Amino acid sequence: MRKIIIAGNWKMNKGLAETREFVSSVVYALINIRSNRVLPLIAPAYPFLHEALRERGGSALQIAAQDVSLNNDGAFTGEVSVSMLASLGIKYCIIGHSERRQYHGETDSSVRVKMLKLFEQKITPIVCIGESLAQRDADQTSGVIISQLNGCLSEIPLVTGTEIIIAYEPVWAIGTGRTATPQQAQEVHALIRKWLVENYAPAVAENMPILYGGSVKPDNLVELLACEDIDGGLIGGASLKAEDFLAMVKIGSNN
Ligand code: 13P
């Protein structure tokens, strides 16, 4: 049975003291949410990953990076490599987020290269895909999703289905307060799972966590998680308040 993953993508929010305070309060509260059903995770900004890892101790709270460089090392000012993340003890890394695609030239093929590099260091990629509003309005959602899956995963070896986490984030629902309806999200999640059956194997499709992202909050999480193929959320704004994050972890643990 797939776990529910409650993943907070903090984007460019929170400094050192706020990261420390959030992690310590969440770690403390998680003692009372002992559940094997849910995997809580946050992705702070690079400079605070070390502190977040230190503060989490042996807690169930996992720490992810928000991106990683395509390059191994050398003259790439401002970049952070996979081996640097591995040296910190990072186990998860978001790649292909629409904000990286929109503002920093991320493409399906760069996502693919990053994924292979992350595999080498045993870091689980959280691979983001999703259509824009114009694409949805033009009825192109399925085509865009399939093309992103083909582009990101072509010749990527997936055997168990637990090697990666997919996050479906319709761009029009990110930070807009406009969530996809559970039906709209479920339709795309089912399409992704069908693609995994056809391109890999039923077991890969069955085991792979597929998260929904785009204006998820405690108020709409229950109905999203009620959908058969939605295994959790990749959450921006609502993951920044420890209280809301914990409320969502609780909802996940009861699912
Ligand atoms: P919001 O939850 O703020 O819409 O952000 C979603 C997101 O982009 C998570 O990666």
Image (cartoon, rainbow, N blue to C red):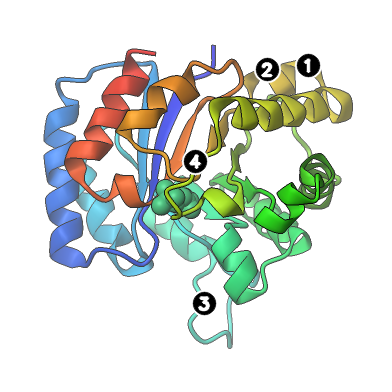
Check residue 179 in the rendering and tell me which mark sits there, or answer none. Answer: 4
**Distance from label 4 to label 3 (Cα)?**
32 Å
Q: Depth-wise, is mark 4 or mark 1 nearer the camera?
A: 4
Residue highlighted by disc 2: 206
Counting other residues with Cα less than 10 Å from the Cα at mark 2, is it few (<14), some (14-19), or many (20 or more)? some
Check residue 244 in the rendering and tell me which mark sits there, or answer none. Answer: none
Q: Position of residue 33 (x, y in %)?
A: 21, 20
**Distance from label 4 to label 1 (Cα)?**
29 Å
| Amino acid type of the residue tagged 2 in the rendering | Glu
Check residue 79 in the rendering and tell me which mark sits there, or answer none. Answer: 3
Q: Is residue 213 left or right of residue 41?
A: right
| Amino acid type of the residue tagged 1 in the rendering | Pro
Residue highlighted by disc 1: 202
Q: Secondary structure at mark 2?
A: helix
Which mark is first along the chain, 4 or 2?
Answer: 4
Which mark is first along the chain, 1 or 3?
Answer: 3
Which mark is first along the chain, 1 or 4?
Answer: 4
Q: Nearer the viewer, residue 223 or 119?
A: 223
Counting other residues with Cα less than 10 Å from the Cα at mark 3, is it few (<14), some (14-19), or many (20 or more)? some
Q: Is residue 111 left or right of residue 142?
A: left
Q: Position of residue 35 (x, y in %)?
A: 30, 16
Q: Position of residue 130 (x, y in %)?
A: 66, 48
Q: Residue at x 35, y 37 (%)?
A: 217
| Amino acid type of the residue tagged 4 in the rendering | Thr
Q: Is residue 175 left or right of residue 195?
A: left
- Which image quarter is the C terminus in? top left
**Distance from label 3 to label 2 (Cα)?**
35 Å
Q: Residue at x 23, y 58 (%)?
A: 51
